[in-house]
Amino acid sequence: MKPMHSAAAAPPLLLLLLLLPFLSAPLLHARTTPTVAAGKNPFTPEAYVIRYWQKQVSNGLPKPSFLLGKASPLTAADYAAFSKLADQNSLSTQLPDFCKKANLLCFPDVGASLEKHSHDVNFATYLNENFTNYGTDHGGGVDSFSKYSENDNVILDNFRRYSRGSTGHNDKFSAYATGSNVIDQRFNTYGTSATGGKGEFKNYNDQVNIPGLKFTSYSDNSNARKQTFTSYSQDANAGDQSFTSYGKNGNGAANEFKSYGNSSNVVGSTFSNYGESGNAPKDTFTSYGTNGNVPENNFKTYATDANDPNESFKNYRDQSNVGDDSFQSYAKKSNAGKVDFLNYGKSFNEGTDKFSGYGQDAANPVTVGFKIYGVNNTFKDYQKGSVTTFSSYVNDSSSSSVADSLAAEGKKVNSWVVEPGKFFREEMLKSGTIMPMPDIHDKMPKRSFLPRVIVSKLPFSTSKLVEMKNLFHASDDSSVAKMMTDSLGDCERAPSSGEVKRCVASIEDMIDFATSVLGRNVAVRSTDNIRGSKGNIMVGKVKGINGGRVTMSVSCHQSLYPYMIYYCHSVPKVRVYEADILDPTSKAKINRGVAICHLDTSSWSPGHGAFIALGSKPGKIEVCHWIFENDMTWTTAD
């Protein structure tokens, strides 16, 4: 009788496969204190990272649990299996399983739906579905989506033909993807050739992180149909929105945006072929991009060839911070009509606004009215024959004068730029100081690093963008494709003068970069938690790292990508502090914060938010800030 294997034994071939990814892993010497907890598999990616830290960092300080917690959660068996697939360039064939087990940010592969729905459907809750043909030729009635894709992490929705050719039909989206994280939503042919009826979006993508929204053909060829967006992408963070063909060839269409992109951070919007060749279009933007941070809005061919257009912008970019706006070919070749900007671009810190081909070649004079017109704007190819009124043209390019004007009017100063406590002076870091704490929440989606053995086999360069998109099933115009190109742009950008930078996609790579800059005697720190965020705090005991001396650090910030990537760079001439954060009422310790003070700000932009908040100029003051959740700073160890 053959001898039986023990329970812990494994066939030699299987054991070899499990060990292949770890043949290069440095094992601990027998005299080294074990660092992998008893009972845990020593061949997982996390176990390897612990051993790698032990080898590369030459001090006995405790290993940073917040960093090790970002290690890949793959089991040893899955690690071996996915490593083999990466070797064969076939990870894309197992993408859903890979994303789930490795804790990655991936959009679901949602197929086309041929499901048909009767009239007057009420969807109370819906998530990650495609509608190939919804509401076509409906007559009368109401379709309602009460909570569509709400409060989820990754949303992928596609409506291909929505209310096409309908008559007197109403559509309602009460809460669309509100409070969700990363969004990729698109409407193709929405309300095309519809007659009458009304489309209404309330709370569309409010408080969303990284919205990616596309309306390809919106209300084209419609007749007397009204569309209303009550709250569109308010309080959103990053992302892009586009309307490719909006109200083209419409007759008497009335479109209204009551609150568009207000209080959003770095959101880009594109309107192409807006109201083109329309007959008596009436569009209203009540509050567009107000209080935004670095908005980028682009209107191309707006109301071109329109007959008797009536367009109104109220509070456009009011109190926004910098950004870049462009209107190209506005009301070109239109016939008569009226276009009003009641409050255009009175920004807290001016951006760049360009108008090209404004009212050009109009058949009859177009009445254009500007009231309270902002700074740093350019007009090209302006139709001289138009009837134009400027009620209050602000031509002072000083951002401080704009801020003073806003304060005199009792208006709120931009919350993104000068959020209380976002920037502060070094003298504030002393025991007993009461100060505001900004919102230090990590707004990025939850992800993990990949093991270096796997990530080293994956494409990551502009020359391999096609392979990258194929790997993650990303179409050319998808949110995934955009996050890839954005990350590549940051990672492939040439370093600034005196800067050393690197994008790292594994903990091993981050350790290597930090030690290459600072040496092997290093420590990494981050603020413990988010308690105290968005409220007043009291500073408790303060400790200066490296004795409070001027030092160099390596700061690492997340980049948005399917797997965890950090942008790490050297930061010279800083002082780093750890401080107890106390509740100002009870004096109880609620957090342990890490703050970094930049002593040389001479190369910073004059429009940097720190100078807006603190009232100074580059090189004149030091600037301090807290390390936000999941960001980190490396220094030499004390």
Image: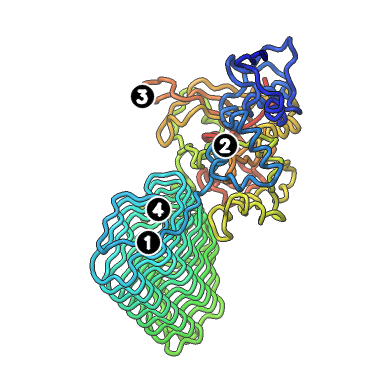
Q: Which residue is mark 1?
A: 287
- Image coords of residue 561 (percent x, y): 58, 46
User: Which mark is first along the chain, 2 or 4?
Assistant: 2
Q: Which residue is mark 3?
A: 585
For the question of whether residue 549 can be seen, the reply is no
Q: Label 1 is placed on what type of residue? A: Ser
- Image coords of residue 513 (percent x, y): 72, 34
Q: Label 3 is placed on what type of residue? A: Thr
Of 59 and 83, nearer the camera is 83
**Numbered-mark total:** 4
Name the image quarter holding the N terminus.
top right
Report the Cα–Cα distance between label 3 and label 4: 37 Å
Q: Check disc 4 and report its element: helix, strand or loop.
A: loop
The picture quadrant where one finds residue 64 is top right
Of 340 and 483, nearer the camera is 483
Q: Say which of marks 4 and 2 sits in front.
A: 2
Q: Label 4 is placed on what type of residue? A: Asn
Binning the other alpha carbons within 10 Å of mark 1 as few (below 14), some (14 to 19) or many (20 upward) gives many
Q: Which residue is mark 2?
A: 102
Q: Label 2 is placed on what type of residue? A: Ala
Contact between labelled residues 4 and 1, with CB atoms less than 8 Å apart: no
Q: Which residue is mark 4?
A: 205
Name the image quarter holding the C terminus.
top right
Report the Cα–Cα distance between label 1 and label 2: 42 Å
Q: Say which of marks 2 and 3 sits in front.
A: 2
